[in-house]
Image (cartoon, helix red, strand yellow):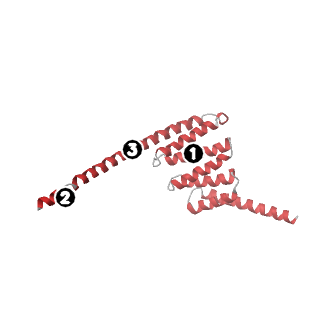
Amino acid sequence: MRNIEKRTANPIWPTCRRILASLVFLSLFSVGAFAQRRAAARTQYEKAEKQRTALEGKPQKERTLKEYTQLVAAYRRVYHLSPQSAEVTTSLQAVGELYQEMGRLFDEKYFQSAVDAYQFLLHEYPTSRYRDDALFTIAQIQQEDLGDTELADKTYQEFLKRFPRSSKAEQVKAALAEIAAEREKETKASSKAALA
């Protein structure tokens, strides 16, 4: 009777061993692939940094939109290769900075692309060391480059709520005071126009 019980229990163990061995093999394979993607992302980041250094070595008048576009794509590839790579947040910050520069040099539409890049950084990497810089820069772009003081006001308020002890807090308060003064000036001007 005992022999019969052992025979019926035996077929399960080889199957379990095969499954366990397969899982171990797959986990080792995925760890290796993950390390390869991280290494590829690091190499891509270094390549993008060299490209940026070369671009910034040229006088601004000689820089082309195509060069900037290629550089933005190079930094974005870091994220696409390995979203968990240590260089991703620095790359996304660089994308925002490059779009800002493109807005100044080529077309104002790139200012919105800069805002989108910084918002992506904030959304995908909320604990990044660049989070307060990104939010502050979004507000600056909204105020100075896009001319949307209402949206800038909201973004500055959000900044103070999220980062009250930031080194940029005083700059934010000054920007809010400037927006309030502009509003007051506009209100007085519209009141005078209505009375006239």
Element type at mark 3? helix
Q: Are marks 2 and 3 in contact (CB under 8 Å)?
A: no
Q: Quadrant of residue 150?
A: bottom right
**Amino acid under disc 1:** Val
Residue at 16% across, 56% down: 7
Between the residue at mark 2 and the residue at mark 3, the CA separation in whole angstroms equals 37 Å
Residue at 71% across, 53% down: 147
| The disc label shown at residue 95, or none | 1
Q: Closest to the observer: 15 or 1?
A: 1
Say whether disc 1 or disc 2 marks the residue closer to the N-terminus: 2
Relative to 188, say whether 40 is above or below: above
Q: How many marks?
A: 3
Q: Which residue is mark 2?
A: 9
Q: Which residue is mark 3?
A: 33
Element type at mark 1? helix
- Classify mark 3: residues with Cα within 10 Å, few (<14), some (14-19) or many (20+): few
**Amino acid under disc 2:** Ala
Q: Position of residue 164 (x, y in %)?
A: 57, 62
Left or right, residue 182 beside residue 96:
right
Q: Position of residue 169 (x, y in %)?
A: 60, 58
Left or right, residue 33 beside residue 107:
left
Q: Quadrant of residue 59?
A: top right
Between the residue at mark 1 and the residue at mark 2, the CA separation in whole angstroms equals 60 Å
Residue 187 visible to the viewer: yes
Looking at the rendered image, the disc whose residue lies closer to the viewer, 2 or 3, is: 2
- Quadrant including the C terminus: bottom right
- Classify mark 2: residues with Cα within 10 Å, few (<14), some (14-19) or many (20+): few
Say whether disc 2 or disc 3 marks the residue closer to the N-terminus: 2
Q: Are marks 1 and 2 in contact (CB under 8 Å)?
A: no
Residue 133 visible to the viewer: no
Looking at the rendered image, the disc whose residue lies closer to the viewer, 3 or 1, is: 3
